[in-house]
Image (cartoon, helix red, strand yellow):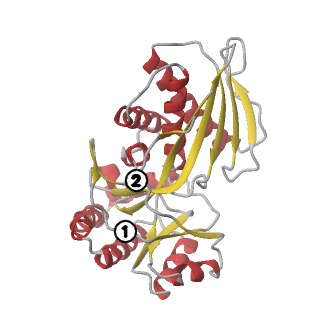
Amino acid sequence: MTTSSAPGKVYLFGEHAVVYGEPAVPCAIERRARVTVERREDERLRVRANDLTLDGFTVTWGGSGTDPRPDVDVPTPLVEAAMGYIDGAIEQALDAAGEDGIGFDITVESDIPLGAGLGSSAAVVVAGIDAAARELGVELDAGTIADRAYRVEYDVQDGQASRADTFCSAMGGAVRVQGDDCQRIEDVPTLPFVIGYDGNTGDTGKLVAGVRELKEAYGFAADTVESIGDIVRSGEIALDDGDVEEIGRLMNFNHGLLSALGVSARSLDTMVWAAREADALGAKLTGSGGGGCIVALDRTEQTHTALEYTPGCEDAFRAELDTEGVRRER
């Protein structure tokens, strides 16, 4: 039996634009997904999922002569996504070990809200590949895990994934991603993250497709995507200078452009404005949008307190930068 964990993430800048070759800067946060893997005697996969903003569920599937779809009473898209990510992680581990026809009991536990823009799927895939590979006697380095995890997300998300989430989860810390160029950012200043969560989930595929349609239909939408890339480049300079106030101002600009592209939501805007009115240095949605989380920068407790009393905010919490990526737990 082996257990690995990997962190979730927030975007300082660049979500959505990163899909079109612009840079993005995600940061790992100290909220983790943990995956435990134990080899079975047969070829089936039995998965128990806890703390994924569900009541929890257990499903078994796979093996010869069985229905390839699990029989479980949870929403079909959620099950299909879970199957895709977990199947993909196991396939990558089997490929790395040069094995096939092996089944596993898998337990997934997570502190990361599912579908909230905090990289829950990437963390599960990264941790799953590491745990399953080690269960098969293979040790993979973080860079290899990041690459294999990206392949899983790319397949499950119909080619609309970027390397940002999986690279950040595998490596930890703050990273810069532009296309296939991925690197850690060293000497990052202390970033006082405060996160607000509305309890909802956005449809990543639909939101990404919506931005694509706008970009193809309107030149100014394409310009907006490029402007987000310009914000990221300015943000890299601010990070290098340790200028947290400037980082906050750029986050505000980034949120405005994401809102113009139609990926914000009333609940997200409400939390963003509550944070700003509490004198946060900056605040924006994080992830694909449509619901989920916002991230703010505030050295004081004012933003955290304001979000706790904001209608539509289900949870508010601080999250430190996690400098450690995928980690062996057992």
Q: Foreground: 278 or 299?
A: 299
Label disc, if present, on residue 323 of the rendered structure: 2
Q: Are marks 1 and 2 in contact (CB under 8 Å)?
A: no
Quarter of the rendering occupied by the N terminus: top right
Q: Amino acid at mark 1?
A: Thr
Task: Say how many tags the image has.
Answer: 2
**Crowd rating for badge 2 (residues with CA inside 10 Å; few <14, some 14–19, many 20+):** some
- Can you tell which mark lies on residue 21? none
Image location of residue 153, percent across then percent down = 46, 39
Which one is nearer the viewer's eye here, 133 or 151? 133
* Image side of residue 44 versus residue 2, left or right: right
Between 108 and 330, which is closer to the camera in this rendering?
A: 330
Going by the numbered disc 2, the residue's amino acid type is Thr
According to the image, label 1 marks what residue?
190
Q: Position of residue 326 (x, y in %)?
A: 46, 41
Looking at the image, which residue is at 45% across and 66% down?
262
Q: Secondary structure at mark 1?
A: loop
Q: Quadrant of residue 39?
A: top right
Q: Position of residue 307 (x, y in %)?
A: 58, 78
Q: Quadrant of the C terminus?
A: top right
Q: Where residue 89 appears, x then y in whole percent?
A: 52, 30
Q: Is 261 above or below relative to 273?
A: above
Q: Secondary structure at mark 2?
A: loop
**Looking at the image, which residue is at 22% across and 65% down?**
240
Sooner in the amino-acid sequence: mark 1 or mark 2: 1
Is the residue marked by circle 1 packed among few (<14), some (14-19), or many (20+) residues within 10 Å?
few
Cα–Cα span, label 1 and label 2: 12 Å
